[in-house]
């Protein structure tokens, strides 16, 4: 097998027309260049150069080898550039997962900006609520802190966890509801109302709400089951009942409903962004984290701990 390094030395000899010139161009000693040249000729079984006065010239075989190897070194240069891009996060694939309301409120702006700044990078975007456990775990995850994570879920020990916001829940009612004009409503005042369920995942978002209801002394009466916040809000607008929704899902609430803060207690969910330890120096991942934090500040003001 031809050693690419010796081939590079040989090409320098051909280009410079002498061993001394190649040594000067490469920063080698003339004896080192001569050794590489002699070894390459033994490896190929070819006479690649011959004397020409005080210098040397390539033989026909040498000229052919030098010409044909040009494409190889172009390929090596591209590979070296690719390796640098992969190391710096400018190429390859970045896996990002997020939950539904973050996807609607934050991710379009984040993804558009990442595509502009890292055009060679492929973003593998997945919705957290329906992520296949057999798929490779994410590099970056925007999620809800869960005090009781499911068995088999990704360990937080594999990630740097950065809190974002504490997302307070609000009640969504019709304009003619007795709660519609209130500054706030006590959670226990909703105990006898018909609730519209809005969480398909039955995960930490719903659990945070149910814990608050238990603290207020009741369990909600869910009269209708929907699978997302927007559908639940549309059911409210039709007069079916009320729904309780976190603030992030109310960024573009329709005029056909009213949103009222909840107190004593206020249900909340804690939102964090997690970045896998193995990509701490990944520029695109760092940028995703930065852009998500900017979006969280836009919708919620100050971040947790800021």
Image: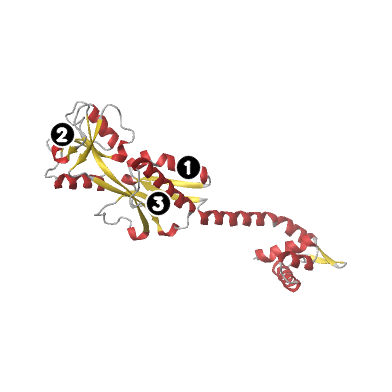
- In the figure, residue 30 lies in which quadrant? bottom right
**Residue 239 visible in the displayed image:** yes
The foreground one among 88 and 53 is: 88
Quick one: SS at disc 3? strand
Q: Residue at x 78, y 68 (%)?
A: 20
Please tell me whether mark 1 or mark 3 is closer to you in this view: 1
Badge count: 3
Q: Are dots 1 and 2 in contact, CB under 8 Å?
A: no
Question: Where does residue 27 sit, x and y in percent of width and height?
Answer: 71, 67
Q: Which mark is residue 194?
A: 2
Quick one: SS at disc 2? strand
Q: Are dots 1 and 3 in contact, CB under 8 Å?
A: no
The foreground one among 201 and 297 is: 297
Q: Which mark is residue 140?
A: 3
Question: Where does residue 75 sit, x and y in percent of width and height?
Answer: 63, 54
Give whichever of discs 1 and 2 has the lower sequence position. Answer: 1
Q: Around disc 2, counting alpha carbons within 10 Å, would you say few (fewer than 14), some (14 to 19), or many (20 or more)?
A: some
Q: Around disc 3, counting alpha carbons within 10 Å, would you say few (fewer than 14), some (14 to 19), or many (20 or more)?
A: many
Quick one: SS at disc 1? helix
Alpha carbons under labels 1 and 2: distance apart = 42 Å
What residue is pinned by disc 1? 113
Alpha carbons under labels 1 and 3: distance apart = 16 Å
Give whichever of discs 3 and 2 has the lower sequence position. Answer: 3
- In the figure, residue 227 lies in which quadrant? top left
């Amino acid at each position: 097998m031809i050693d690419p390094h010796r081939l590079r030395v040989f090409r320098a000899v051909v280009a410079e027309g002498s061993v001394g010139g190649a040594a000067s161009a490469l920063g080698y000693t003339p004896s080192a260049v001569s050794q590489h040249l002699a070894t390459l000729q033994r490896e190929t079984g070819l006479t690649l150069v011959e004397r020409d006065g005080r210098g040397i010239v390539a033989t026909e075989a040498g000229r052919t080898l030098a010409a044909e190897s040009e494409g190889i070194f172009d390929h090596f240069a591209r590979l070296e550039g690719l390796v640098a891009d992969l190391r710096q996060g400018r190429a390859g694939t970045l896996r990002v997962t997020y939950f539904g309301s973050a996807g609607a409120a934050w991710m379009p702006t984040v993804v558009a900006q990442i595509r502009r700044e890292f055009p060679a990078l492929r973003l593998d975007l997945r919705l957290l609520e329906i992520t296949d456990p057999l798929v490779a775990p994410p590099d970056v995850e925007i999620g809800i802190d869960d005090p009781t994570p499911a068995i088999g879920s990704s360990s937080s020990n594999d990630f740097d966890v950065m809190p974002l916001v504490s997302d307070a829940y609000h009640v969504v009612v019709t304009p003619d509801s007795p709660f519609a004009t209130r500054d706030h409503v006590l959670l226990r005042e909703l105990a006898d109302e018909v609730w519209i369920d809005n969480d398909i995942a039955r995960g930490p978002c719903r659990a945070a709400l149910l814990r608050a209801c238990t603290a207020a002394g009741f369990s909600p009466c869910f009269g209708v089951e929907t699978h997302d916040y927007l559908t639940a809000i549309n059911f409210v607008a039709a007069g079916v009942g009320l729904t309780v929704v976190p603030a992030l899902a109310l960024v573009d609430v329709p005029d056909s409903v009213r949103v009222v803060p909840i107190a004593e207690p206020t249900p909340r969910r804690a939102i964090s962004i997690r970045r896998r330890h193995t990509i701490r120096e990944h520029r695109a991942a760092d940028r995703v984290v930065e852009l998500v934090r900017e979006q969280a500040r836009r919708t919620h003001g100050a971040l947790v701990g800021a």
